[in-house]
Structure formats: structure tokens, C-alpha cells
Image: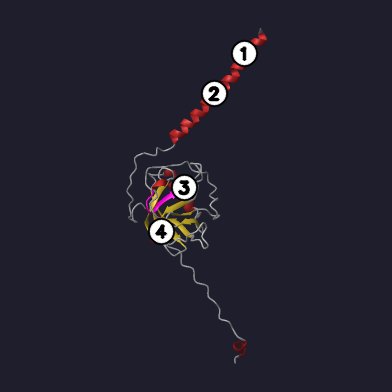
């Protein structure tokens, strides 16, 4: 009889543990859903083009094609992503990184120091902050892997409207100046000669554009007659 009671208790315990584990998992999923920003949350769609206003939220990219691109960051759209962009910029992370995937009529993707599309920063990946803001010409959005919460440092700038990306990628800003230099980014996957970010900064840092690199001087060939003075 005692043995039967032990077996019954053991059977009850075995069936109870998975139920408790399932309840815990469901609680964690619910908590994660609560922590994630609602896609349809009310947002201000206005992009202020005034370079003198809110300069700590203007991202400047000085490109190797000689142009400076100004991007209005929107922390109300994607606070975590804007904070990541600003933190990496202040560390100098983006300086020298190439646009490694550039598709004509679609977008230019950069932010990977390896130039392979597989790299990122040492910071943890970000929780997605998808929103209802449309992907228009000049939109700046965060690249990611298949997992929604896998964005880290890579971003892309849209050449033409691409509404199929809406609510699937975190839109965090838009170009307000220098879009012609974005259009001039070399195409390819990867490009044969990638356009690079020479310097990334925030407008509030007041950094001037880097001085253009001097073209290498080719020394004239010296003949034997020149050496002999004849």
C-alpha cells in the first residue's frame, strides 16, 4: 500500500512539472510581448529638415565619394535603435566601414566592419522596434537576420519607396540632406570598389568633413640621359 502511494505521488509530480514549465514559458512570452513596442503605436511622422534643430539627432555620414549625408534620427519611432546608432557613432565604429550590399532601385546596406554582411558590433542584438512608418526614398532602417530581434549595427538606406518592408524592419530615420551622394554609392553585392563611410558623426559634435585624400603623385621616369646631364 505504501509503495502504491509513493508511485502515485511520483506520477503526480511528473505530470505537474511540465505544466509548471509550460506556465513559466507562457509567462515569459507574455512579458516579452508586453516589453515590445506596439507596431501601431501613435508616432509623429514629421521629418524636420532643419539642420539647426535637435542636432544631437542628426547623423552625418561623410562618404568616400566626397559627399556628406545628413540623416534625421527619430528616437520616438525606435528609441533603442537610435541609441545604438549614436553609441556606435561616438565610438568611431562606423568609420571606414563599406556599403557592402547595394542594389540599384532598392537600397544601400552598410554598417558591417567585415564587409561580408555577417559582422556587427560586440554589443548585444536589439529587440525589434517595428513601426508603421513607411519605407520611402531616403528612409534609414535597420538590417537584421531572419530572427526579428537580431539587428545589431547594420543599416540600409532606401533608394525608392519599398512598402513591403514596412512593419518588418525597424525604420529609425530619413535622409534630410545629401541624397544625391547616397544615389552615387557604388552598386554590387559586394561592389568591386565599395563606397565607404570615411567618418560618421552627430551634428552636435560639430566635426568638419574629412579633408579629401590627395591623389597619389606619379613620379616621372628618369632616363640615363637625364642622369648624365646630356
- Marks 1/4: CA–CA distance: 71 Å
Element on which disc 2 rests:
helix
| Foreground disc of the pair 4, 3 | 4
Residue at image mark 4: 69
Coloring applied to the structure: secondary structure
Q: Which comes before the other along the chain, label 2 or label 3?
A: 2
- Marks 1/2: CA–CA distance: 18 Å
Q: Position of residue 26 (x, y in %)?
A: 49, 28
The numbered disc on residue 209 is: none
The answer to whether residue 178 is seen in the rendering is no
Which one is nearer the viewer's eye here, 101 or 45? 101
Residue at image mark 3: 84
Which one is nearer the viewer's eye here, 54 or 216? 216
| Foreground disc of the pair 3, 1 | 1
The numbered disc on residue 20 is: 2
Categorize mark 3 by other alpha carbons within 10 Å: few (<14), some (14-19), many (20+): some
Residue at image mark 1: 8
Element on which disc 1 rests:
helix
| Foreground disc of the pair 1, 4 | 1
Magenta stretch: give its range.
135-143
Categorize mark 1 by other alpha carbons within 10 Å: few (<14), some (14-19), many (20+): few
> Is residue 197 rendered to the left or right of residue 8?
left
Q: Which comes before the other along the chain, label 2 or label 4?
A: 2
Q: Position of residue 55 (x, y in %)?
A: 37, 53
Q: Residue at x 58, y 20 (%)?
A: 15
- Marks 2/4: CA–CA distance: 54 Å
Q: Is residue 112 on the magenta stretch?
A: no
Amino acid at each position: 500500500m505504501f509503495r502504491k502511494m509513493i508511485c502515485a505521488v511520483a506520477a503526480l509530480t511528473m505530470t505537474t512539472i511540465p505544466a509548471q514549465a509550460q506556465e513559466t514559458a507562457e509567462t515569459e512570452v507574455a512579458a516579452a510581448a508586453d516589453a515590445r513596442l506596439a507596431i501601431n503605436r501613435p508616432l509623429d511622422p514629421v521629418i524636420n529638415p532643419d539642420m539647426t534643430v535637435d542636432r544631437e539627432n542628426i547623423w552625418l555620414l561623410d562618404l568616400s565619394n566626397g559627399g556628406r549625408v545628413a540623416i534625421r534620427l527619430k528616437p520616438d519611432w525606435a528609441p533603442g535603435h537610435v541609441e545604438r546608432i549614436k553609441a556606435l557613432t561616438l565610438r568611431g565604429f562606423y568609420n571606414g566601414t563599406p556599403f557592402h550590399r547595394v542594389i540599384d532601385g532598392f537600397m544601400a546596406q552598410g554598417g558591417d566592419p567585415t564587409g561580408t554582411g555577417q559582422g556587427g558590433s560586440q554589443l548585444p542584438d536589439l529587440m525589434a522596434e517595428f513601426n508603421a512608418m513607411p519605407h520611402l526614398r531616403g528612409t534609414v532602417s535597420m538590417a537584421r537576420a531572419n530572427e526579428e530581434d537580431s539587428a545589431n549595427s547594420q543599416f540600409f538606406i532606401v533608394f525608392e519607396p519599398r512598402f513591403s518592408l514596412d512593419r518588418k524592419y525597424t525604420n529609425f530615420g530619413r535622409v534630410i540632406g545629401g541624397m544625391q551622394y547616397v544615389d552615387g554609392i557604388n552598386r554590387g553585392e559586394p561592389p568591386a570598389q565599395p563606397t565607404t563611410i570615411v567618418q560618421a558623426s552627430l551634428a552636435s559634435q560639430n566635426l568638419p568633413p574629412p579633408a579629401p585624400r590627395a591623389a597619389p603623385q606619379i613620379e616621372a621616369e628618369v632616363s640615363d640621359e637625364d642622369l648624365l646631364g646630356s
